[in-house]
Image: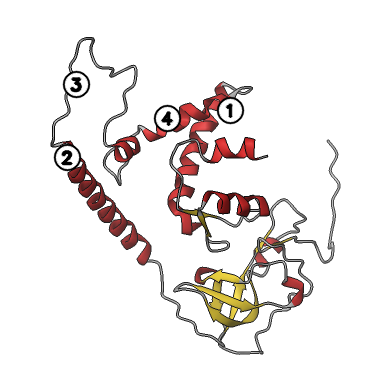
């Protein structure tokens, strides 16, 4: 299995000291853990049910999906052959935050393509100022990233309210009904969004908390981002029963109609 996994995860000659991934089954498996130990890589898992932890990766995936969707429409049987081309196109496209292409950011030079090969006989010289130019370029990129980060933070802070919790507080946990299962009338709109309350047993970092979950939720990871929580002001008057809900590890549950009030048959 390592022969198939290694070239896909590590196509370059550089190994990472630190790697951030979500809590998917492929990344929390024993094989993945042993692979990271063998490579000397410190694998860190993101907050559960909080894709904003790797927001940049999620955004890149959306762009690549759009690119591959167009390839799938044209080359339906061999769209997978377009993966290297999609990667090449993205790495050589202009990025607003960097104000240059990712390839130029990584290697310090523009990528040579058949459209901009050097002319035959052209002399390429390297001056002693190459290191100085690279340092100036890195400073330029860092300033652009900080400016973009500050701009994006201001957009997010307009609709974000700080929620400070402490050990011993009770909070509700946000859950989501599964799509594509039994739905009846407006049941989906009236379905519970939060369950609980649950007691906070530990604060894990600045924006994550560990909850005391009941035994029937043992399969759910007990550390949650603050965006998944809602503070409970009255305990235990506001307890929402979760014994009737089969909550999955990804905080989803199936909806089923309690009672069919009416039915109608339609012939075509």
Residue 90 placement, left or right of 172 = left
From the viewer's side, name the closer residue of 92 and 182: 92
* Spatial separation of the CA atoms under disc 2 and disc 4: 25 Å
Q: Which residue shows up at 27% across the image and 56% down it?
A: 146
The numbered mark, 4 or 3, whose residue comes first in the sequence reads: 4
Q: Position of residue 170 (x, y in %)?
A: 59, 84
Tally of numbered discs: 4
Q: Which residue is mark 4?
A: 88
Residue 172 drawn above or below residue 251:
below
The numbered mark, 1 or 3, whose residue comes first in the sequence reads: 1
* Spatial separation of the CA atoms under disc 2 and disc 3: 16 Å
Instruction: Give the structural element (helix, strand or loop) at label 1.
Output: helix
* Spatial separation of the CA atoms under disc 4 and disc 3: 24 Å
The numbered mark, 2 or 3, whose residue comes first in the sequence reads: 3
Q: Which residue is mark 3?
A: 124
Q: Which residue is mark 1?
A: 80
Asked if marks 1 and 3 touch (Cβ < 8 Å), the reply is: no
Within 10 angstroms of label 3, few (less than 14), some, or many (20 or more) residues? few
* Spatial separation of the CA atoms under disc 1 and disc 3: 37 Å
Q: Which residue is mark 2?
A: 133
């Amino acid at each position: 299995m390592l022969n198939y996994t290694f070239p896909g995860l590590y196509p370059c000659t550089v190994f990472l000291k630190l790697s951030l991934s979500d809590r998917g089954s492929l990344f929390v498996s024993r094989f993945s853990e042993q692979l990271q130990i063998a490579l000397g890589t410190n694998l860190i898992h993101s907050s559960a049910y909080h894709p904003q932890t790797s927001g940049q990766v999620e955004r890149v995936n959306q762009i690549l999906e759009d690119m591959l969707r167009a390839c799938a429409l044209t080359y339906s049987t061999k769209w997978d052959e377009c993966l290297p081309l999609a990667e090449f196109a993205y790495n050589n496209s202009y990025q607003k935050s960097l104000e240059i292409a990712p390839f130029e950011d990584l290697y310090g030079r523009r990528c040579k393509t058949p459209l901009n090969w050097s002319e035959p006989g052209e002399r390429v010289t390297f001056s002693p100022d190459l290191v100085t130019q690279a340092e100036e370029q890195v400073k330029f990129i860092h300033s652009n990233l900080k400016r973009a980060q500050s701009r994006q933070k201001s957009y997010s802070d307009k609709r974000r309210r700080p929620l400070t919790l402490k050990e011993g507080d009770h909070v509700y946990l946000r859950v989501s009904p599964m799509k594509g299962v039994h739905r009846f009338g407006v049941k989906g709109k009236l379905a519970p969004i939060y369950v609980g309350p649950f007691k906070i047993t530990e604060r894990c970092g600045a924006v994550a908390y560990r909850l005391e979950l009941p035994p029937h939720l043992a399969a759910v990871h007990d550390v949650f981002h603050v965006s998944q929580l809602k503070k409970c002001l009255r305990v235990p008057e506001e307890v929402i029963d979760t014994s009737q809900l089969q909550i999955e590890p990804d905080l989803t549950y199936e909806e089923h109609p309690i009672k069919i009030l009416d039915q109608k048959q339609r012939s075509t």
